Image (tube, grey):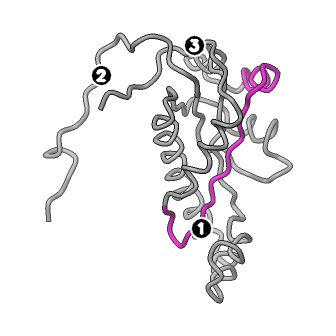
């Protein structure tokens, strides 16, 4: 329980080998029907990160710009087109293709789950993480994802931690308030 949300990142770069290992770890996490709808855009260059600046909420600008890597956690609304590889159950692709509501809900839910796997895998690799939801998704999609047709879900700043987290851990709900025991 020592892992904490990053307050700042060191200047140490995150190598591509680490990012490949990160993806190899996170992709092994389960999704419903092995649908694996998450997609990830890794903004590694200063130029790529600066392009996202106007889309960020004011409170996220400083930390996002200081991270060596900013990840756009996305999902593919047409994830079912990969079922030939991921889950060739007869009729499954057509079932999702025929129901936009079902496919959107499935893509968002499972893509979010895979984003959480990214956070856990990054921590396992010694990286500090800072998830962010304060951004203009339409701007981000237009700038980075239009060609692929992916949808932006949330952002994760990644890097190596700089020093120890100084602020106390924010409270969490106890099981009595967050769980039902039925």
Between disc 1 and disc 3, the foreground one is 3
Residue 150 in sight: yes
Element class at badge 1: loop
Q: Are marks 1 and 3 in contact (CB under 8 Å)?
A: no
Instruction: Determine the residue positioned at 57% across, 70% down.
Output: 102
Distance between mark 1 and mark 3 Cα atoms: 36 Å
Q: Mark 1 or mark 3, which has the lower sequence index? A: 3
Distance between mark 3 and mark 2 Cα atoms: 21 Å
Res 10 label = 3
Distance between mark 1 and mark 2 Cα atoms: 35 Å
Label 3 crowd bin: few (<14), some (14–19), many (20+), radius 10 Å? some
Q: Mark 3 or mark 2, which has the lower sequence index? A: 3
Specify the farthest residue to the right: 147
Residue 129 in sight: no
Specify the farthest residue to the bottom: 90
The residue that disc 1 covers is 35
Res 169 label = 2
State the quadrant of the C terminus: bottom left
Residue range of the region highlighted in magenta in the rendering: 30-54
- Residue 4, percent from left and from top: 38, 26
Element class at badge 2: loop
Quarter-of-image position of residue 5: top left
Judging depth in this view, the residue of 32 and 99 nearest the camera is 32
Q: Mark 1 or mark 2, which has the lower sequence index? A: 1
Image vertical order of residue 90 relative to residue 43, above or below: below
Instruction: Determine the residue positioned at 50% across, 57% down.
Output: 29
Label 1 crowd bin: few (<14), some (14–19), many (20+), radius 10 Å? many
- Residue 173, percent from left and from top: 22, 37
Instruction: Determine the residue positioned at 52% across, 29% down.
Output: 127
């Amino acid at each position: 329980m020592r892992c904490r949300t990053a307050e700042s990142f060191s200047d140490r770069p995150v190598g591509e080998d680490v990012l490949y290992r990160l993806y190899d770890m996170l992709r092994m996490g389960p999704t419903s029907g092995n649908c694996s709808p998450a997609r990830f855009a890794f903004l590694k260059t200063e130029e790529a990160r600066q392009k996202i600046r106007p889309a960020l909420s004011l409170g996220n600008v400083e930390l996002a710009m200081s991270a060596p890597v900013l990840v756009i956690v996305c999902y593919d609304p047409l994830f079912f087109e990969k079922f030939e590889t991921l889950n060739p159950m007869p009729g499954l692709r057509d079932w999702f293709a025929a129901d936009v509501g079902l496919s959107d809900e499935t893509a968002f839910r499972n893509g979010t789950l895979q984003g959480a796997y990214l956070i856990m895998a990054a921590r396992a690799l010694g990286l500090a993480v800072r998830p962010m939801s304060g951004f203009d998704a339409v701007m981000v999609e237009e700038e980075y994802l239009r060609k692929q047709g992916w949808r932006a879900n949330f952002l994760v700043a990644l890097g190596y931690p700089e020093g120890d987290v100084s602020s106390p851990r924010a409270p969490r709900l106890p099981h009595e308030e967050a769980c039902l025991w039925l």
